[in-house]
Image: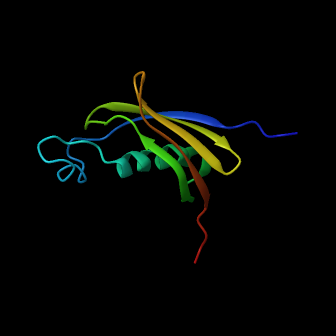
């Protein structure tokens, strides 16, 4: 008997005054991929706790830019220790991929 995949969805927006935007790109800001991936991690925390640690990103593809202030949605689907995600703005996919995770251990 297998376990049913867990799914969740959240929305987010990156403020135009986010500290990563001035250098990415001057005069034409685009939300950096690492900021989008952080939104994916934050979207997973309600289900997995703040101890979520990304251990590997076997597949990530950014297909459209996300501009500051635009609302985007993160959809997550858990399959074993793989978390599949899709980041979209309306009907347009911005990014998709798979990440592996593990719990943070005390050192």
- Rendered residue at 26%/34% (across/down): 69
Q: Residue furthest right?
A: 1
Q: Residue furthest top?
A: 91
42 to the left or right of 33: right
- Rendered residue at 16%/40% (across/down): 28
Relative depth, front residue between 80 and 11: 80
Number of disc labels: 0
In this picture the colour scheme is rainbow
82 to the left or right of 19: right
59 to the left or right of 89: right
Task: Specify the quadrant that holds the C terminus.
Answer: bottom right
- Rendered residue at 37%/52% (across/down): 34
Above-or-below relation of 85 to 82: above
Relative depth, front residue between 11 and 83: 83
- Inspect this view and state whether residue 88 appears: yes
- Rendered residue at 40%/22% (across/down): 90
Q: Could you say where residue 88 lies in the image, as x and y percent from the top left?
A: 42, 30
Above-or-below relation of 58 to 55: above
Q: Could you say where residue 44 lies in the image, as x and y percent from the top left?
A: 54, 45
Above-or-below relation of 88 to 102: above
- Inspect this view and state whether residue 50 appears: no
Q: Could you say where residue 39 lies in the image, as x and y percent from the top left?
A: 42, 45
Q: Residue furthest bottom?
A: 107
Task: Specify the quadrant that holds the N terminus.
Answer: top right
């Amino acid at each position: 008997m297998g376990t049913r995949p867990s799914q969740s969805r959240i929305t987010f927006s990156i403020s135009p005054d986010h500290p990563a935007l001035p250098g990415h790109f001057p005069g034409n800001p685009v939300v950096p991929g690492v900021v989008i991936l952080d939104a994916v991690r934050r979207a997973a925390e309600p289900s997995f706790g703040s101890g979520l640690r990304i251990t590997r990103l076997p597949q990530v593809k950014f297909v459209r830019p996300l501009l500051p202030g635009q609302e985007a949605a993160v959809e997550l689907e858990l399959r074993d220790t793989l978390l599949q995600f899709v980041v979209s703005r309306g009907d347009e996919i911005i990014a998709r991929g798979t990440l592996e995770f593990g719990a943070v251990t005390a050192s």
